[in-house]
Structure formats: structure tokens, C-alpha cells
Amino acid sequence: NSTIVKCIAYHLTSFSVLLQFAQYLVNSRILSILTYVGLSISLFCLLITLWTFTTVRRFHSIRGMIHANLAGSLIISTCIFLAGIDRTDNMVLCQIIAAILHFSFLASFAWMLVEGIITFKMATQWPETVFSCVIYNVLG
């Protein structure tokens, strides 16, 4: 039936939850352990990255701000994924977690787009203005 949504997650990463079409014959316990260990290491490294870009004076620039915001959006998505991926019993909570995950990944992609724009402007030696920073924050 096309009107019924069913939240079930046997996962390795958040993208596989979104794109999984068939059941695999892999032990889901092993995949869960790998997921939590990998995402915990990723979260730790993202926290170090965010701390570095916000505290080290050398990185207080437009690129540093973009990297810090990208790290922040990835931290949010990783925390939401770790905290909520097994919360599939309540349909409303499952949909809220899915919406937050989609939004935080969309924000991450937007910050990657802004990073690409900055890299292009640096390669073509296009001058930066104060207004550019406002546009980058709105876009990201």
C-alpha cells in the first residue's frame, strides 16, 4: 500500500538507512557495533575540528567560519543519528528524527556548496566583501 510509511532500520550508516531496499543476511548486531564505534570516533574528531576552528586565531576567517559551521551541522546530524536511530517504535518520534536528519544533512551539503563557492572565488581571485559573509551565512 503506497499510503503506509513503515520506519524500520537495519543500518551501517545514515545513508544506508535512507537507501536500503532489501534485507541483507549480515548480523545486524555487528553492523550496529560498527556503526556506533565509527560514528563515535567521527563525532570526537568533529568536536576537535569545531574546537580548533573556533579557538585558534589563525582560522578566524571566512573559510574558518564555513568549516566550523560545516563541522557543527555534521555534529548535529551525528548526534541525532546516534541518539535516535533505534527509536522506531513511536511513529511520530521516528518522523521527527527523520526530518531533523534530513535537514541537518541538507545544511551540511549547503555548507559544502558555500565552500565550493569560496574555493572558486579564491582560484579566480575574486575579491571578498563584508556582504559576501552575510550571503554565505544565509546560504549555509
Image (cartoon, helix red, strand yellow):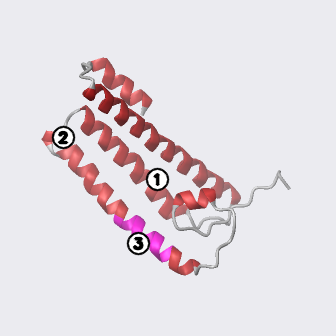
How many labels were placed on the picture? 3
- The relative height of residue 138 versus residue 39 in the rendered view (above or below) is above
Q: Give me the residue at 27% from left, 52% from top.
A: 49
Structural crowding at the residue carrying mark 1, measured as other residues with C-alpha within 10 Å and reported as few (<14), some (14–19) or many (≥20) = many
Q: Which residue is mark 3?
A: 37
Examine the image and state in which quarter residue 22 appears. Answer: bottom right
Q: Quadrant of the N terminus?
A: bottom right
**Range of the magenta residues?**
32-41
Q: Quadrant of residue 16?
A: bottom right
The x and y percentages for residue 107 are 46, 41
The type of residue carrying mark 3 is Val
Which of pointers 2 and 1 lies earlier in the amino acid sequence? 2
The residue beneath circle 2 is 59
- Quadrant that contains the C terminus: top left
**Residues under labels 2 and 1: Cα distance?**
24 Å
Cα distance between the residues tagged 1 and 3: 16 Å
Disc number placed over residue 77 in the picture, else none: 1
> Regarding mark 2 in the picture, which secondary structure is present there?
helix
- How far apart are the alpha carbons under marks 3 and 2? 29 Å
Q: Residue at x 47, y 76 (%)?
A: 33
Between disc 3 and disc 2, whose residue precedes?
Answer: 3
Judge by depth and name the residue closer to the eye, 128 or 72: 128
Cβ atoms under marks 3 and 2 closer than 8 Å: no
Q: Position of residue 104 (x, y in %)?
A: 49, 46
- Residue 86's x, y, as percent? 58, 68
SS class of the residue under badge 1? helix
Which residue lies at the image location 45% right of the left edge and 70% below the top edge?
A: 36
Please provide percent x and percent y for residue 30.
Answer: 51, 80
